[in-house]
Image (tube, helix red, strand yellow):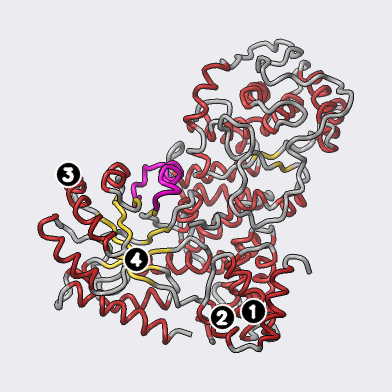
């Protein structure tokens, strides 16, 4: 049996269009750091292809800096020796990686956003980021290497990103950890967050939830929204940080207010449950709406159901149908099923038997059958059924 | 199709069973045989005191499977493998769910229980189990389904593809609540094993209630 990944928290990370609309630098890193560097394919992805930077860029014909080979030591030969840097032990950490991977990944969503272009940085670092954004990874690498030796933490962080994502260089998590560590100790909140996530997921280091929590907390204290969100999850989970739903809710509110795309949906759950906050359906609906507008597909469906039922929000079937359609359009079978129902019954939308049957066929193909709709299509003419089937087969092409 | 029910798929609810408190291979086999002869059952969750689970599993797993019923072992993968059970029902909060699910798939089923909040359920869902279970295995002390478990299961079923199981009440009629909430499975324990006319009659009656309620639902 194959089931769709239910988790909005992870899904939203791959729903590139929205994430990227908000921050053009958000990356979706590979989920697993197993022996292979090939990112695992997302299970039955409902979202359109992430328009992020390609994972394996074709290098320019004449590279500015020859990228280090996969077999070379994880410390780049050109890197000057920064004082105080503790070099990772590549052999030891490599050995610890396979057993430790995949375990904590699912308990906490993965997100590593590229640090925003530093406002205070000088032209050199800016050029490196600019090159990165354009996909000139080798140029970015070259510039960042030069800048990093001068103690430029933003450049060091960028090097971590390049190694973590394998942009222009062979993907190398140990190397990424080393650069993130350097920048994190230099106080860079982006690096602190990225390093925390490496420890949380056991990428390039053995899983260490305590260290992960420490770095994530440092970053959160400096105001990084994604770090506040992750710290909130740690407080909900109660392993590396004490279980404290109130603190979690507080962090989530601050993260959401600061523009974190994942926080609103979790906050909606806390309000639905009365966990860490007073139970409040209106607040839950408000945060669901926010998450839905950010493109969280599960939130779209849940908000649509609340609108349809008038739960915590004024009943509005037309608006509900709109959100069902939006989630159905990106392939969510639950939303396709609900959309088929409202189209069949003409609830919030003009009744449209062919469209109803089309969405039912699509949901059914995705494993979501429905006795009511089966009876409904049995009552259609052969012509109507054929038209619906043909439309379903053409989907998502309109 | 009108009102709030219009969005609920109330047509797919099936029965699960949970082994009763104090079940031993000697005392339980007859009751189980009777129950499974009574009608449709999707799965049986086998639970017992730690030292007794392997013995109970050894007799109940083949019995369940002979009736086409999936046998799931409570929290013990080793016993599940040794007895050839169909899967494991995990409700140990300390467990690494993703690792357990990954270790069982694709050959065996993995279900996750002990979910007390939406966030818990979402986190469990990320591990891609075959079902999520709301309420405790012995959460059938009242006639009706515990409101909290019903609320969470209804919410889940409305939103996600992974099916939900809710622990039913001590009264067979509680299966109606599960149907009306659009929940995919309802798990019974006392309602079946302590049914005055015996477990076979209980399973038959529960299935009649499921069909009736599904027929009446919009």
Q: Which residue is under mark 4?
A: B42
Q: Residue at x 70, y 66 (%)?
A: A329
Q: Label 2 near label 3: C-beta < 8 Å?
A: no
Q: Rate crowding at label 2 as few (under 14), some (14 to 19) or many (20 or more) other CA atoms within 10 Å.
A: many
Q: Nearer the viewer, residue B175 or B63?
A: B63
Mark-to-mark CA distance, 3 and 4: 26 Å
Q: Chain of mark 2?
A: A
Q: Are marks 4 and 2 on the same chain?
A: no
Range of residues picked out in magenta: B89-109
Q: Quadrant of residue B214?
A: bottom left
Which of labels 3 and 4 is toward the front?
A: 4
User: Helix, strand, or loop for circle 2?
Assistant: helix
CB within 8 Å, label 2 to label 1: yes
What residue lies at 36% left-to-right and 46% top-to-bottom? B93
Magenta stretch: includes residue B142: no
- In what element is the residue under mark 4? loop
Whole-percent x, y for residue A220 in the image: 61, 38
Measure the alpha-carbon separation of dots 2 and 1. 8 Å
Q: CA distance from mark 1 to mark 3?
A: 54 Å
The answer to whether A280 is drawn above or below residue A132 in the figure is below
Mark 1 highlights which residue? A357
Of all chains, the one bearing label 4 is B
Left or right of A208? Residue A14 is right
Query: Residue, x 65% and y 22% (percent of image)?
Result: A175
Residue B51, label in figure: 3
The image shows a total of numbered marks equal to 4
Image check: B113 left or right of B160? left
Which is in the foreground here, disc 3 or disc 2? 2
């Amino acid at each position: 049996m194959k089931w769709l990944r239910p988790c909005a928290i992870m899904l939203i990370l791959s729903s590139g269009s929205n994430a990227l609309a908000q921050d053009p630098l958000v990356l979706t890193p590979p989920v697993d750091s197993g022996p292979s560097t090939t990112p695992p394919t997302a299970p039955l992805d409902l979202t359109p292809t992430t328009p992020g930077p390609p994972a394996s860029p074709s290098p320019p014909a004449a590279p500015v800096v020859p990228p280090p080979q996969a077999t070379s030591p994880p410390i780049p030969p050109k890197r000057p020796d920064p004082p105080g840097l503790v070099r990772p032990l590549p052999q030891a950490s490599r050995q610890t990686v396979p057993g430790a991977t995949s375990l904590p990944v699912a308990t906490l969503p993965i997100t590593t956003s590229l640090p925003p272009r530093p406002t205070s940085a000088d032209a050199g670092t800016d050029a490196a980021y600019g090159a990165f954004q354009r996909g000139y990874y080798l140029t970015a690498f070259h510039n960042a290497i030069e800048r990093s030796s001068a103690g430029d933490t933003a450049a060091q962080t960028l090097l971590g990103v390049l190694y973590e994502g394998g942009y222009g260089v062979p993907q190398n998590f140990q190397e990424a950890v080393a650069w993130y560590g350097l920048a994190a100790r230099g106080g860079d909140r982006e690096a602190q967050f990225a390093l925390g996530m490496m420890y949380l997921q056991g990428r390039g280091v053995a899983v260490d939830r305590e260290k992960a929590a420490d770095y994530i907390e440092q970053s959160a204290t400096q105001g990084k929204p994604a770090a506040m969100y992750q710290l909130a999850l740690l407080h909900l989970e109660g392993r590396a940080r004490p279980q404290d739903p109130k603190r979690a809710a507080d962090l989530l509110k601050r993260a959401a207010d600061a523009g974190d795309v994942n926080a609103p949906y979790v906050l909606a759950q806390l309000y639905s449950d009365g966990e860490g906050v007073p139970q409040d359906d209106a607040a839950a609906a408000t945060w669901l709406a926010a998450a839905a507008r950010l493109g969280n597909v599960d939130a779209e469906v849940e908000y649509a159901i609340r609108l349809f039922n008038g739960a915590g929000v004024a009943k509005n079937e037309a608006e509900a149908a709109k959100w069902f359609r939006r989630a159905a359009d990106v392939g969510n079978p639950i939303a396709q099923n609900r959309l088929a129902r409202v189209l069949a019954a003409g609830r919030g939308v003009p009744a449209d038997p062919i469209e109803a049957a089309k969405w039912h066929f699509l949901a059914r193909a995705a494993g979501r059958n429905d006795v009511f709709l089966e009876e409904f299509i049995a009552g259609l003419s052969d012509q109507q059924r054929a038209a619906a089937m043909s439309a379903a087969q053409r989907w998502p092409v309109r | 199709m009108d009102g709030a029910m219009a969005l609920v798929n109330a047509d797919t609810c099936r029965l699960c069973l949970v082994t009763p408190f104090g079940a031993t291979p000697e005392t339980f086999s007859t009751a189980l045989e009777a129950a499974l002869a009574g009608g449709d059952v999707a799965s049986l969750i086998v639970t017992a005191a730690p030292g007794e689970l392997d013995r109970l599993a050894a007799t109940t797993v083949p019995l369940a499977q002979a009736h086409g019923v999936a046998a799931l072992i409570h929290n013990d993968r080793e016993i599940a493998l040794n007895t050839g059970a169909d899967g494991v029902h995990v409700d140990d909060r300390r467990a690494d769910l993703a690792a357990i699910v990954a270790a069982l798939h694709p050959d065996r089923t993995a279900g996750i229980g002990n979910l007390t909040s939406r966030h818990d359920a979402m986190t469990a869902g990320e591990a891609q189990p075959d079902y999520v279970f709301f309420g405790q295995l012995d959460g059938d002390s009242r006639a009706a389904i515990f409101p909290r478990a019903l609320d969470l299961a209804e919410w889940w079923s409305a939103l996600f593809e992974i099916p939900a199981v809710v622990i039913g009440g001590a009264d067979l009629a509680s299966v109606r609540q599960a149907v009306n909430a659009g929940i995919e499975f309802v798990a019974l324990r006392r309602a079946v094993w302590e049914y005055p006319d015996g477990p076979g009659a209980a399973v038959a009656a529960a299935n009649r209630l499921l069909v009736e309620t599904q027929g009446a639902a919009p």
